[in-house]
Amino acid sequence: MAFCLMPAIYLSPDTVLAQTAPTEGMKENTARVHAFIEAEIILSPGNRISNGTLVIRDGVIEAAGENVSVPADARIWNIQGKTIYPGFIDAYTTAGMGKSDREVNQGNISWNPNIRAQLSAAAEYLEDEEEVAELRGQGFTAVLTAPPLGIFRGSAALVSLNDREVAGKVVKENIVQTSGFRRSPGLGFSYPTSALGVYALMRQTLYDAEWHREAHQAYQENPSLERPELNSALLALNEVITGEQPLLIETSGAEEILRAYSLSEEFDIPLWIVGNGHEYQILDVLREKQFPMIIPVALPEKPDLDTPEKSMNVSLADLRHYYLAPENPGRLEKEGIRFSLTSRGLDNKSNFLKRLRGAVDAGLSSDMALRALTTHPAELLGVSDSHGTLEPGKTANLIVADGDLFESNAKILDVWVDGSRFAVNKERRTDFAGTWTVSVSDGSASGRLELEEKSSGGAAGSVTLNGIRTELRSVTLQDGASRIRADFRGDRYDLEGLIRVTASISGDEITGWAEVPGQGRLQWTGRRSSAAERVEDSARTGVNRNLTLSNIRPSMEYGRESMPEKPETILIRNATLWTMGEDGILENGDLLIRNGKVAATGTGLNAPGDALVINAEGKHVTPGLIDAHLHSGVAGVNEIGNAITAEVRIGDVLTLNNIWMYRQLAGGLTTAHVMHGSANPIGGQNQHIKMKWGALPEDLKIEDAPVTVKFALGENPKRVGTDRYPETRMGVEQIIADRFSMARDYETRWNEWERNRQGIPPRRDLRMDALRDILNGDIIVQSHSYRQDEILMLMRLAEEYGFRIGAFHHGVEAYKVANELAEHGAGAVVWSDWSSFKIEAQDGILYNARLLSEAGVLTSLHSDDSQIATRMNWEAAKMVRAGMDPEDALALVTINTAKILGIDHRTGSLEEGKDGDFVIWRGNPLSITTKVEQTWIEGQKFFDLREDRTLQQRIQKERSELINWILEEGYE
Amino acid sequence: MRKLIMMCILLFTARAGYAQAPVPAPLQQQPIALTGATIHTMAGEVIENGTLLFQEGVITALGTSVSLPDNAVVEDLSGKHIYPGLIDSYSQMGLFEIGSIEMTLDINEQGDVNPNVRAERAFHPESRHIAIARSAGILTAISSPGGGLISGQTAAMRMEGWTWEEMTLRPGVALLINWPNANSDSYEENLETLQNVFDDARAYSRARKANEEGGSWLAMDTRWESMIPLFTKERPLLVNANQVQQIQDAITWAESEDLEIIILGGRESYMVSEQIRRRDIPVVITTVIGSPGRSWESYDHQYSLPARLHRAGVRFAISGSASAPYAHRLPWEAGAASAFGLPMEEAIRALTVYPAEIFDLSDKLGTLEPGKNATLLITTGNPLEYETRIEQVFIDGRKSNMMDMHRQLYQKYREKVEAAGAAAQD
C-alpha cells in the first residue's frame, strides 16, 4: 500500500530484489548501477585512493580502485575534486522511536512500567522523515536505534537510513538489550523514584530473569508442577543473563559508568556503555575495563558569564568541563580506549559535524574520528562484513563531500544509502560572481554589474549605469534555472521607485530584462569581463586551546592530582594525645603509625630514621572524627516508591563530585555512615565510608563494616504522599511487623528448597533477603526516631521477633526511655540540641546525650547535615556546656560512634592495630578557638591547612584563566 | 561518669524544681553588690577582683573600691566573671514556637508591604525558647518579623518579665526590608516596586507635615504613617542583603533616599568592605558557622567573614540565625569567628557593645558602666567558650530563674533513670 507513497522514484527506484511487497503499476526497472569517477575515495580508514573509480550495483559496492573500468550500464558521476567516505554509522540513537511517552499496558508484561525489555526497536520503528533527513545530512547512513523509555528498554536494531518500508530498513535486529539508570517520569510515578531504587530494580530484574529461566526449566521437566508466570520482559533478558547478548547502559556522568561496571561484575555480563562526555575524568578505569564505549560529541552549554556577578556563581567543575569536553574523544583515543561516536545528546542533530570537528580541533585524529563512525560501530554491531568501509561486497553506503570532512568545513553533497542517492547540499551550478559589462538593448544605458557570493551562500552586488553606482537591494539566485534576480532604487537615475531585474546566465553571458517604473520592460545583455576571486570557504581556523589545566579528580575545586602519599612510618610527637582508648589523654604523647595502622601510642616513642616525624608540640591529636548520620555525596537519598525498601543501597549511588567531603575533612571528619532517608518505615541500606577525597566511590567504602539498614518512625514515614500506607504510628508498627512475618515465611520456603530441591525454585527477592538478614541480626537496624513511644515500640517489636535494634538516630526523646534503651542494648545517636522544628521535636534538649550516657546507653552524636558534619568537634563541645566530661564528650564523635556503627575494630580510637585515622588540631578540639591543621586517614594526609591555601590559589588562577578563555574563545 | 554526675549536681542546684514552671524574677528591691569577680566591662580595662553595684535595675558603681550602701545584698563571686548580657541582633524570639506548626508562627504577615506591623505586640512571653536563651546568657533579643518586601518593625526585647509590655526594652528599633534578589529576572521590576513604596510613603510624610502646619486634611494611611520615623532618621532600615550587588545597590539607594541603613546578612559584604566602611554602615552578620555557598569558596569562607570585616574596619554585630529555639547558640556563632582570625575581644563585642550601638541601645546596654542597665552574666569564664558555664544572669537588676525547658526535662527524666538504677540495685 505504502509503496505508491514513495516519493523519490527517479533517484531511488525500488527495484530491490529482496522484498516481499507486490509490484503495483508499471515495474520500475532503471538500472541501479552507478560509477563515481575521478574521485578521491576513502576506501576504509587509512586507505585513500586518489583519482579512483567506485562502482555500485544494486545497492552493493561492486568495485573500487584506481584502475576500475566503468560498466556499460552505469550512470556516470564525475565528481572530480570531491571525496567519497564510507557512510557513517551512529552507534546509539532513538531514531524512529517516536517522541511521545507510551505506556505499555497490555500483554504479559512486567509488573513495573519501567521494565520494557520485551520491546524491539525493529518492531517499534516508525519513520520520522525529518529526523532521518537530519541524520543523513550529517553523513549517517545507518543507525543503531533503541526504545527510549524505561530502565530496561528493549532490544536495539540497526536501521538503514534509506526510504523504504521499515522491513527494508532493518539491517539487523535484537542486537543488544538496552537500559539506563533513569526512570521515565512519563511512565507514571511508582517504584523506583530514585537512583537507589533504579539500581535495586535492575538487580532484582536480572535475578528475576535468572529465576524465570530456572523456573521454566523446572516446569518443562515436570509439567505437573504449578506453572510459573510467563513474562515477556524477563524472557527477553534471557540472553543477557546468560552473557550471550550484551547489555547496553546509557549513562549520565562518570559515576553512572562506574555504577554500570558494578552491575556487570555482580552478574558477570558484558556491557556496552553509552557515555556522556565526562569519560576523560575516569580514563584509568575505562582503560582497565575495556568495555565498548559509545561516546557522544555533544558539548555542555556555555556557562553564564554575562556579568561578573553571574560569573561568581559558575563552578570550576562547570568551567573545566566546558573547556575539556571537546577533548573527551581525543583523550580516549590517546588512552587507547576503543569507542564509537554518537549524535546522542545533541538537541539539534544538525550540529553533529560541527561538534565532531570541534573534537578534531581538540585532539581527536581524523583517522580515529572516521573509524569511530564506520569500522568501530560496524564491528561492535556485528555488521563489519557489510558495513563500515567501501570495499567491494559491502553495502553501498557512502558520503560524497566537497573536501575533507574532518580537517575542513567541507560540505556533504550527497549521501548514498543502500545504493540510493539522497541530496544533502546542492552544489552551486550557476557561476554568477564577477564583473559583468552590461548594456540596455535600446542603448539608453550601459555600465557594470558586479555580483559576489556572500559567505552565507547568498548573493549581493551593485550596478553602475552611466557612471552612477547603486547597491542592489536584494539579489536572489535560482540556481537550478541559472537565473538571478535583483532590484535597485532608481532615484539616482531620475527614476521613481524600484527597478526590478531578472536574467539568465549561460557561461560568461547574461541575458535579461528589467521592469522600470514608467518605462515598461527593457531588455538588456552583458558579458563577464572578470571572474570573482575564488574564496576557499571550507578552511577552518582552529580554536585557540592554550590552557594547561590541572589533571585532577574530582574534576572540580580542590580536586587531587594524585592520592596522597602513604609514608611507611609516621611519628607524631609531643602532642596532647586523646587516644580515646584505655590510655586516656596523654600529655606529651607520641603516636606511631606504620603502614597506615596505629603501631603504638605513648611517650618518648622512637621511630626509624626514614620515618616522617611531625612535631606536634602545643597541638592536640585526636582520632579522626566520625559522623554516624550523613546524607552528603549521594545521587539519591530516599526511595519513596514503597513503604518498605530494604533492598536499596546507598553504596550504589555514591557520587564523585562531593565538595562536602573536602569541607568535612577540613573539619577533621574521617569516617561517615551515609544513610538512606526517612521516608519509609523500613528504608534502604546505609554505607560506611572513609572520607578519601579524590578516590573513586567504590574505594571510599569500609569493606569490613557491618551492613546497616535505615528504619524511620514517626512523622516522616507517615506523611509521604496521601495514599501510601501507613498514615499513623500504629500503621508504621503494623507494616514493619507484617514484613517481618513475610521475611520469616520467605526464609522458611528457601530453607525447605535448600533441603529437598523439589518443585519450582523460590524466587530470590532482594527486599526479603534484607529483611531476613535483619531478623537474623546480619543487618543492623539504625532507626530514625523522635518520640519515646515509637522508640519503645520498635524495641519491643524487635524483641518479639528475637533481635535487637542497633541504634536509634535523632532520638529527640531518647532520654525519656534511657533505661529501656540501656536494657535493650540499643545505642542512641542524637543531635546536640535540635529542637522545636516540628511537633515531634518539641522536647529536644541539650542534655539528651548526657542523660543517655548517664543511664549507660552507648551514645553518639550525629550531624544529619552536611555543614554540621564539618565541625563535629563543636557538636561534642556543646555537651561540655551541657555538663559532660570533655573526654566523654569527644567519645560521642569518635569511639562511641565507631562502636555503634560496628567499626571500632578499625577506627574511633588511637590504639594499636587500628587505622591511622587522626586529626592534628591547633588547640583543644573542644574549644571554640580551635581548628584543624591536618587530617589523616589510614596513614595518608587528606587535608592540610597550608596545602589548602595553595589549592585556593590554584583554583583562583584556573577560574580566571577559564573565564577569560570562555569570554574570548568560547563556543556556543 | 563520676565527674558527670558531680557536674550535674553543680549545675542544677534547684533539683526537683522541675515540677514548677520558672517564675519571672521580681523587680530589684534592694541594692545588689557583686564582689570579688573579674568584671569584663567591655568599656575598657578588665577589672580584677572588682565590685559591681546596682540599684533599681541600673548600675550605680563599679570598680575595686566601691562603697556599698548598708542595705546592699552582697554576693561574693570570687573566681567568677561578669560580662554584659549578650544581645541577639536578629531573632524571631516570641514569634516562633514550633517550626512545622503554622499556627505557632507569627513571622510573615500577608502581602509584601507591612511597615506597620510591630514585633513586640505579638511577642509570646510564655514561649519555651525565652528561658533557654536566657540561661545561655542571651538577655536581649531584637525580635523581628520576616517575609515579603517590607517585613515590619523589630523590637528590642528583654528575656525577663510577665508580659510583652514589660519585656519590651525599646519598640521599633528598625524596619526590616528584604532587598530584592539581584539574580532574579524581575530584579529591576522589584526595585521599582520598592521605590514606589518609598516615594508614596515620603509623599505622605510631607503631606502629614504640611497638615500639621495647618495644611489640608489628610486621610490616615497606617502603612505610610509607620514609615515617617525613617525619613526623620529616628528609625534605621535593617536591609536584608547578602549578595554583593544587593548590598551595593542598597547602599546607593539609601544614600539617594537619605535613609539610615543597617545591612543584615552581609554574606558578600567583604567584597565591598571599603564602600561600607567609608559610609560607616553597620553590618549584622547572620552566618558565621556556615559553609560557603559556592564550591570555589574556601571551607572557612563564612567563619572568616567577621575577621575580614574587622580588618577592613567595618562595624558589625553577629547574630546567627534568627531561629528562636537556637538562640542559645549565639555565643558559639560569634566565638567561631575567633578561631578564624577575629580577636576574641571583638567576638564578644559583636554580641554586646556593637549591637547596642547599632540599634541605639547604648544608653542601656552593651557595656557595664554606671547608668546602664544591670543586665549581666555571671560565668565561670569567657561566655563564648563551650566549657564555660553561665551560672546566673541579671536582667535590669532582676535575678532571673536559671531553669529552662531543657533543664526541666533533664531533671524530670533523670529521676526516671535514677529510679530504674535504684530498682536494679534492690
Image: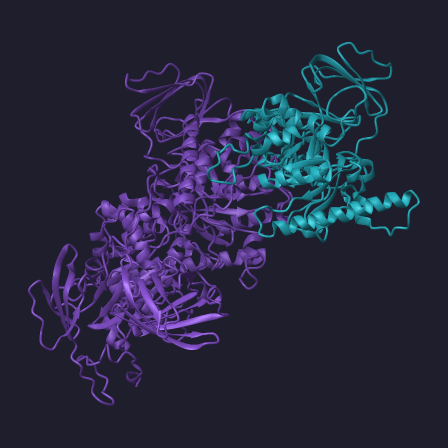
Chain colours: A purple, B cyan
Q: How many marks?
A: 0
Q: Is residue B323 above or below residue A971?
A: above
Q: Is residue A828 visible?
A: yes
Q: Where is residue B156 in the image (x, y as percent from the top left)?
A: 76, 35
The front one of B15 and A163 is A163
The front one of B63 and A294 is A294
Q: Position of residue B314 (x, y in %)?
A: 63, 28
Q: In this view, does A689 lie above or below A149?
A: above
Q: Quadrant of residue A661?
A: top left
Outermost residue, top side: B65
Q: Is residue A639 above or below residue A383?
A: above
Would residue A246 be found to the left or right of residue B367 on screen?
left
The front one of A212 and A433 is A433
Would residue A765 be found to the left or right of residue A631 on screen?
left
Outermost residue, front side: A443
Q: Where is residue A913 in the image (x, y as percent from the top left)?
A: 34, 28
Q: Where is residue A761 in the image (x, y as percent from the top left)?
A: 30, 64
